[in-house]
Amino acid sequence: MNEFDRISKNFSSSEGKDLKLKALNGFKDILPGEAELWRQVEDRARDIFARFNFAEIRLPILEKTELFARSIGETTDIVEKEMYTFVDKQITMRPEATASLLRAYIEHGLYVQKPVQRLFTIGPMFRHERPQQGRLRQFHQMDVEILGSANPRVDAELMAMGTMLLSELGLCVSLEVNSLGCPACRPAFRENLLSFLESRQDALCDDCKRRSITNPLRVLDCKKPNCRSIVEDAPSILEHLCPECAAHFSEVQDGLRQLGIDYSLNKFMVRGLDYYCRTTFEFTTTDLGSQSAVCAGGRYDGLVEQLGGPKIPGIGCAMGMERLVLLLLQKEQKIEGPAEMDLFIAGLGDAASRIAFSLMQSLRKEGVRVAMDLDNRGLKSQMKQADKAGARYVLMIGDDELAKNTGMLRNMATQEQQGIPLGDIRILIETTTTGRHV
Ligand code: ATP
Ligand code: MG
């Protein structure tokens, strides 16, 4: 089993045993080894968010159910069947971050401090879906939102940021863009689409038969092959845009060209949430089967007002971290191991072990990464542990050394050893540590 199989299947040594207490279906542990890869993704994202002037916001996991019903839309898949709701309390574990972020934005009047707010948040989301590779019930998103600007350049900038992050992670994805128009241009399109769908009712799947009455746009992004081929001939929203939306969309594309961002148009991308208007986009990959979207988002100019705030436009997108990590694993991306230890202290005998124990604490206070064997095993076993921990130095303290308040310091790379006063250990390690302040 290679690294990818091991991590993507969450292989554990107790596999096969009849364990009663296992994680819930669709909920996954992120074990050491994989966790480092997650941190790399997150660090790179934070670096890029800072380059684009985004500030972090941290939000609660539970919100009133009404928040999601009102923003995401009553007839969307998420609200209809994917939410984890405590029905007796009318609260829900967030299925996405935009609604919560906007709730906080309005509640704390963040629009007063700055006319344009650029915010990001990273964390778990919950949807009761059918679990499969790249689709979990607890999954993680990196979510970014720009509030306070309807400027099409903002849309281009956000997509440029997504492109930069995915390319700096070494991933090969494509960007698809569409415009969903606004409340002025959508009714005519809806009418046209409705009569098209009515003429093909019999051929649609049961879900789409229902959707064509409750939420006809949804039919356009049905994943079933038969429905897909039917909607090929459906009318396009792009041909129904009002002059303002058409101009906005053309400027978005102009912005993308100016920033050198490759994209293609996808007139059927409607996205699974009701709050979108005008620009919508998705970054997709062909390497994850039907879980092809790694990042998706769009503009939601009426949403702040709809949630009780002022009339403020906004745009945002969310990246699915599980899918990014899976892609990196498929590429057999080299995973950085845990941070290497500076020093392993091998105390030999009870008295030396006691000294080592308190020396370890004072060195840690100084910023040194130190480990020791608390169980006082033999020197051979301790040297093995030091090797496994990737320690750059081992300090051996035995009875002889202890009497002189010294230790024997071994450089694990060169195998050189020297006796040193215990008080000098930090200086010695510091002067030989490059690239890290201790
Ligand atoms: P999909 O079409 O794959 O169901 P979506 O349109 O429901 O995606 P969004 O709500 O736009 O997804 O969320 C943004 C991103 O979050 C997706 O592009 C995907 O990368 C990720 N994502 C969404 N749902 C899941 C899930 N259940 N498990 C893992 N990642 C997910
Ligand atoms: Mg979905």
Image (cartoon, grey):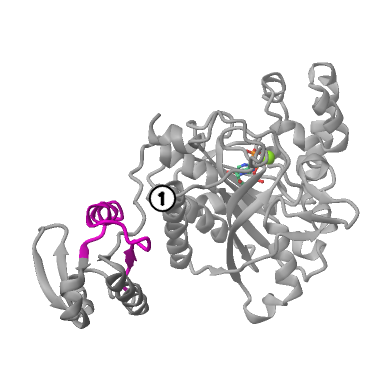
Quarter in which the N terminus is drawn: top left
Q: Nearer the viewer, residue 348 or 262?
A: 348
Label 1 lies in ligand 1 vicinity (Cβ under 8 Å): no
Is 149 within the magenta? no
Please state the horizontal and vertical placement of residue 369, each as a whole percent of the image: 32, 68
* Residue 257 visible (yes or no): no
Q: Residue at x 8, y 62 (%)?
A: 416
For ligand 2, give the image quadrant: top right
Quarter in which the C terminus is drawn: bottom left
Please state the horizontal and vertical placement of residue 208, each as a whole percent of the image: 80, 27
Q: Residue at x 57, y 30 (%)?
A: 17
Q: Which residue is mark 1?
A: 260
Residue 239 is left or right of residue 52, and the answer is right
* Residue 130 visible (yes or no): yes
Residue 339 is left or right of residue 249, and the answer is left
Res. 230 image quadrant: top right
Is 393 within the magenta? yes
Name the element at disc 1.
loop
Q: Residue at x 83, y 38 (%)?
A: 215
Residue 289 is left or right of residue 200, and the answer is left
Q: Is residue 171 above or below residue 15?
A: below
Q: Residue at x 41, y 50 (%)?
A: 260
Residue type at mark 1 is: Gly
Residue at the extreme top: 203
Please state the horizontal and vertical placement of residue 284, each as a whole percent of the image: 53, 38
Res. 232 image quadrant: top right
Estimate how packed mark 1 is, as few (under 14), some (14 to 19) or many (20 or more) residues with alpha carbons within 10 Å.
few
Stretch in magenta: 368-394
Q: Is residue 262 above or below residue 40?
A: above
Q: Nearer the viewer, residue 327 or 255?
A: 327
Residue at the extreme right: 88
Q: Is residue 335 above or below residue 374?
A: above
